[in-house]
Amino acid sequence: MARPPTFAPQPLSSGTGPDGKGDDTIVTFSGDRTGAVRLVEDPELSPLDLTVAPNGNVVVSSERPFGALDAVTTVREYDPENGRLVRVFSASDVAEFRRPRGLRFGADGHLYCAAQDEVVAFDFTSGRCLGAIVRLTRLHGQALAFFSTVGPSLTCEE
């Protein structure tokens, strides 16, 4: 599914600004990039990375409170037209999912999130966490990239 036409040309931004504001905010910029409008204000959100899903929704990794040992870590999906929370992805009881950062969609339609010591996969259609597909001590991933492989590839068992 393509992105909604009113959303596609507008850049997004998330995270905390120099004034300390924005921990619960995602903003979108006007087409001429001169003005910012708050798209999302969610008191449970502490945005770390965001991407646009194949369905056009905004998907954000979150750790709240940021940096806390007992932080609640989630991936949150928002409607790009009104900023409404659509659903929350959680890895509870399936993966450790600490310090979630980089988000990418794979060719298989799954959503992948780089986290501390692992990369966690979610079935985007159902929202179900598929668990850690990579575990590597001291991994502090900020981004993910997928490359075609000649040999065996990683797959998620469902």
Image: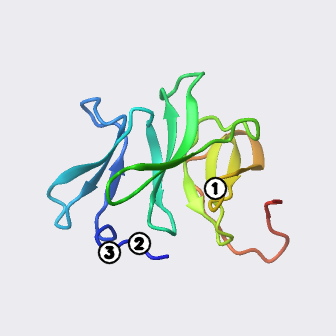
Sequence-first disc among 2 and 1: 2
Q: Amino acid at mark 3?
A: Pro
Q: Residue at x 28, y 32 (%)?
A: 21
Distance between the alpha carbons at the discs numbered 3 and 2: 6 Å
Q: CB under 8 Å between callouts 3 and 2?
A: yes
Foreground residue, 10 or 144? 10
Q: Which residue is mark 1?
A: 112
Q: Is 151 left, or right, of 80 in this rendering? A: right
Residue 86 image position (x, y, % from top left): 48, 51
**Residue 3: mark in rendering:** 2
Q: Residue at x 66, y 71 (%)?
A: 147
Q: Amino acid at mark 2?
A: Arg
Q: Amino acid at mark 1?
A: Tyr
Residue 27 image position (x, y, % from top left): 29, 50
- Local SS, label 3: loop
Foreground residue, 71 or 115? 71
Nearer the camera: disc 3 or disc 1:
3
Q: Which residue is mark 3?
A: 5
